[in-house]
């Protein structure tokens, strides 16, 4: 409890909660907008995929409402984290492995060394 001189605010919990909820909503909506914008920028020049944005939003809402309690939410968060790490580092590892194998077998690359 924080006491403010004058007694205008007795508890600042309600104000802090409102600010926290607004910050959470704005950051989440910004991430959602960026994800849709990036996917549209990737696929739009090549083909017409207007349904892809709608599918991404629908799937993210379904995933958001899956957990029943805080324990399931933590498990879902951990699995999404591990999935994100996997889809980040596995392609990078394959890329380095491909470059290493090509460099090892290519005669043109040997002359550059």
Image: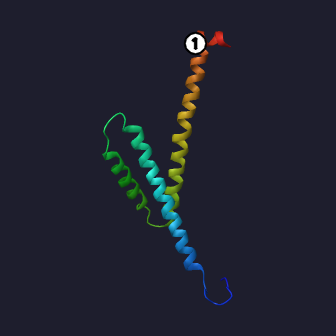
Between 110 and 83, which is closer to the camera in this rendering? 110
Between 79 and 65, which is closer to the camera in this rendering? 65
Q: Position of residue 11 (x, y in %)?
A: 60, 84
Q: Is residue 106 above or below residue 53?
A: above
User: What coloring was used for the rendering?
Assistant: rainbow
Residue name at image x 61 percent, y 16 percent: 104
Q: Position of residue 55 (x, y in %)?
A: 34, 50
Q: Position of residue 69 (x, y in %)?
A: 47, 67
Residue name at image x 42 percent, y 38 percent: 42
Q: Position of residue 31 (x, y in %)?
A: 48, 53
In the visual, does 27 lie left or right of 10? left
Q: Is residue 86 above or below residue 63?
A: above
Quarter of the picture holding the C terminus: top right
Q: Check the image and name the residue furthest to the front.
A: 6
| Secondary structure type for disc 1 | loop
Quarter of the picture holding the N terminus: bottom right
Q: Check the image and name the residue furthest to the bottom.
A: 6
Residue name at image x 39 percent, y 43 percent: 40
Q: How many marks?
A: 1
Answer few, some or many: residues within 10 Å of disc 1's Cα (few below 14, many 20 plus, some between 14 and 19). few
Badge 1 is on which residue?
106
Residue name at image x 55 percent, y 69 percent: 20
Q: Is residue 23 above or below residue 100?
A: below
Q: Find residue 60 and report its image quarter.
A: bottom left
């Amino acid at each position: 409890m924080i006491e403010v001189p004058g007694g205008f605010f007795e508890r600042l919990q309600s104000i802090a909660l409102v600010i926290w909820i607004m910050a959470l909503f704005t950051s989440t909506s910004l991430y959602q907008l960026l994800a849709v914008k990036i996917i549209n920028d990737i696929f739009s020049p090549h083909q017409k995929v207007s349904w892809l944005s709608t599918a991404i939003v629908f799937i993210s809402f379904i995933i958001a409402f899956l957990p029943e309690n805080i324990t399931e939410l933590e498990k879902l968060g951990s699995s999404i984290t591990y999935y994100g790490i996997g889809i980040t580092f596995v392609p990078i590892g394959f890329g380095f492995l491909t470059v290493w194998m090509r460099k090892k077998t290519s005669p043109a690359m040997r002359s550059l060394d």
